[in-house]
Image: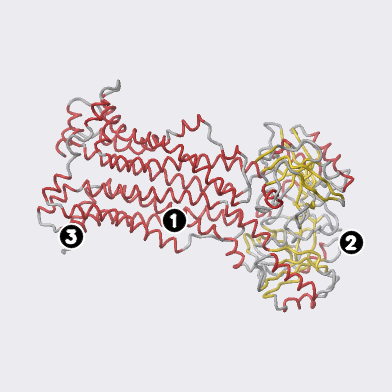
Amino acid sequence: MRARPVARAVSGGLTRRQVQTVVIFTVLLVSTASATLGLGLLLDSNSPFQHAFAAQRGAEVAASIDAAKATAGQLAATGRLPQVTAAAGPFAEATITPRVSAHGGITLPSAAVAGRASPGGPVDDLTLDAGRWAQRPGEIVLSRDFQYPGPPAQLIGTQITVTSTPGHPALTVVGVAKSITDTADAWVLPAEIAALRPPHAPAAAQMLYRFHHADTQVQISADVTALTRVLPAGTITGTGSWLTVKSQETGTIAIIVPFVVAFGVIGLVMSVVIVGNVVNGAVVAGYRRIGVLKSIGFTPAQVVAAYVAQAGVPALAGTLAGVVVGNVLAVPVLSQTATVYGIGRLLVPAPVDIAVPLLMGALVGLAALLPALRAGRLSAVQAIATGRAPRTGRGYAAHRLLGRLPLPRPVTIGLAAPFARPARTAVTIAAILFGATAVIFAAGLKATLTKTDNGQSHAASEQVQVVPAVHYGPAPHNGTVPGFGGRPPLAAGHYRTVGAALRAQHGTLHWVAEAMPMVGVAGLTDPVPAEAFQGNAAWTGYGMISGRWYRAPGEVVVNTGFLTRTGKSVGGTVTLTFGGTQITARIVGEAFDLQQSPGQPALLTSWQTLGGTGAGLTAQQYDVGLRPGTDPGAYTHALNHALFPKFFASATTSDPIYQTLSALIGTLTLLIALAAGLGVLNTVVLSTRDRVHDLGIFKAVGMTPRQTIAMVICWIAGAGLIAGVIAVPVSVILHSSVVRAMASAAGTGLPASYINVFHPAELLLLALAGLVIAVAGALLPATWAAHTRTASALRAE
């Protein structure tokens, strides 16, 4: 087979059909970019925490140590136990009350500070996000999760005053780092800890361990028991397991997977439809030229090679460009995901960059090969005849029927035109259907995520939260690793102090105090975190999955994890234990509550149900709802001045994961809608070429450019409207299924209002999404057709 004639035929086809070449290139670019982004995120979202945990040699157990009970040699000896693979420490530890100089001076909640000479080590290899590590006394490195109303990196170069230590030593912030298991809130040089520890506070330290077997809680417990046996009694005052953090991180990541899969399937199937239609249309539109090539001596093999290459060259370029674009688009999305989960850096996996181009190349090759083989078998006369406009008689019945409607003639001609090419019309409807489905699905998903964010963060109802800023003495670990949580209680008189300050603020609409005790539950081994509200808390924004909010003492609201773990149901009773007293309570509602680890139980009730102050309850947080129009920033600033230095008020913020999800949804939707629009553009271009003679006749008998545009747009408008109408129920079903799958991955149910986000009026409006995509895709070729000269159109035939 001679290559030069084939190359010349390919070159001529590419230059003569530039629009077709651009469409193939762009559709493959968009399809490949969408597939690369979606698959890259999907693979990266499956196990980023595990990858980061392994890379940073995360601590599988972090043990809080009473340094007075064991020597450094005894602690170091635990690293040689048969169960231990690596150990780090002891790292001296102190709990400080920091006051930052920013914003005129703000006292922050208590922070656990560890003494470390460097960020690296055999266990808990810290990643330095910004700045540098502490090199001399008086310098401090903050955790990325340091409790500050803003990114901790903003504090680099500023001073933190330790108000809980005599002399109020000042520390300069020199860096921000991240521990994969949040082993501390900040780090200083080891020699600095003694100066930060209050005189009456006992010496404390932490030991970090990795074990041969630490994949289950049973194995973790056995490992901790082995440590306890070789150390003096009382040395280990608390432990934290990496499984707790893993459950929180991987459970949140699992929420992403269902909707990424949904978008991936939509994008892939639509790419198949569009690419097949584009390439097949390119070959079919070239049948007449195929006949000419055959008449001058081209063999069937040369014809097939020429037309496969004519489609393959722009497709290959578009695929390679799409991989690059997909990786570029993935950078901000994956970087934000990595920041949210504290996993360093995420990139599109190399197998995705290899597999996606191969898949798209095989798809394009197959789509081009089948019609090219058919063309190669035709004789020259058959090829020229096949390349002409639709067969005589096809679509005439539709023209006659629609011609009776009281519509302008260009409109009825345009509406009837798709019946002349039913196969092409069906493929176009399918392409628009997938694009419209993506748009409607994205609109519903975004509405659900907004409701979910408000239901989890309560940012729409509890605009401000007030927490204690001062805590004297050792931090109450309660069996957790420092930095994992644990909020100090307040003295009873503080309730009146905070209440008076809140009532004095003009913008206060609601406020409620809450305690956060651990409550024993009959049938469960571990205590359950509870929130007991002092005052009416019905306004706080918890979405009800079933039942109602509690109204009287003895009633509790629980989350899905509580019902799953206990086997209870709404309407049943449960026995609680708090303050040495057993309490029989009735479950009156199931609330959407993901404040704890995914699938973990949680309980909401009134202050009185748990016995109130007499049972040992003290307020640990105040939730504040603001009057409409009140600026949360100005409100918190004024409140901090009023409550200084005992309390810290901050504006409630949304969970960063929802920003990541919204960005990803918008990116994927834009790519898919763009691909659908290009598919429409390709169809209209092909239809324009099919009917170039008809266009010339219409123009010759007086059709104006505006009428031509209307006619060409109507060629595709009917298909867009049909696709939009079909897309509505498909999108509603897809949205409901995906949202329920996301909730299941998070171990929770969802309130009906989170799922039923589409209102009838909105659905009617969203049904026009297909029409909008169709018109947008048809507008450019319609304009081209309107400006085509009559003589040129007739001569083209």
Q: Quadrant of residue 690?
A: top left
Seen at 55% across and 45% down, the residue is 739
Q: Quarter of the image containing the N terminus?
A: bottom left
Mark toward the start of the polypeptide (3 vs 1): 1
Q: Are marks 1 and 2 in contact (CB under 8 Å)?
A: no
Observer-side mark, 1 or 2, equals 1
Alpha carbon distance from label 3 to label 1: 34 Å
Q: Quarter of the image containing the C terminus?
A: top left
Callout 2 environment at 10 Å: few (<14), some (14 to 19), or many (20+)? Answer: few
Element type at mark 2: loop
Above or below, comparing residue 374 to residue 514 in the picture: below
Observer-side mark, 3 or 1, equals 3
Q: Which mark is residue 374?
A: none
Residue under circle 1?
Answer: 36
Callout 3 environment at 10 Å: few (<14), some (14 to 19), or many (20+)? Answer: some
Amino acid type at mark 3: Ala
Residue under circle 2?
Answer: 200
Q: Which mark is residue 301?
A: 3
> Is 529 or 103 nearer to us in this picture?
529
Q: Position of residue 584 (x, y in %)?
A: 81, 45
Element type at mark 3: helix
Alpha carbon distance from label 1 to label 2: 58 Å
Q: Position of residue 178 (x, y in %)?
A: 65, 61
> Is 536 or 578 nearer to us in this picture?
578
Amino acid type at mark 1: Thr
Q: Position of residue 95 (x, y in %)?
A: 80, 59
Mark toward the start of the polypeptide (3 vs 2): 2
> Is 392 or 313 nearer to us in this picture?
392
Amino acid type at mark 2: His
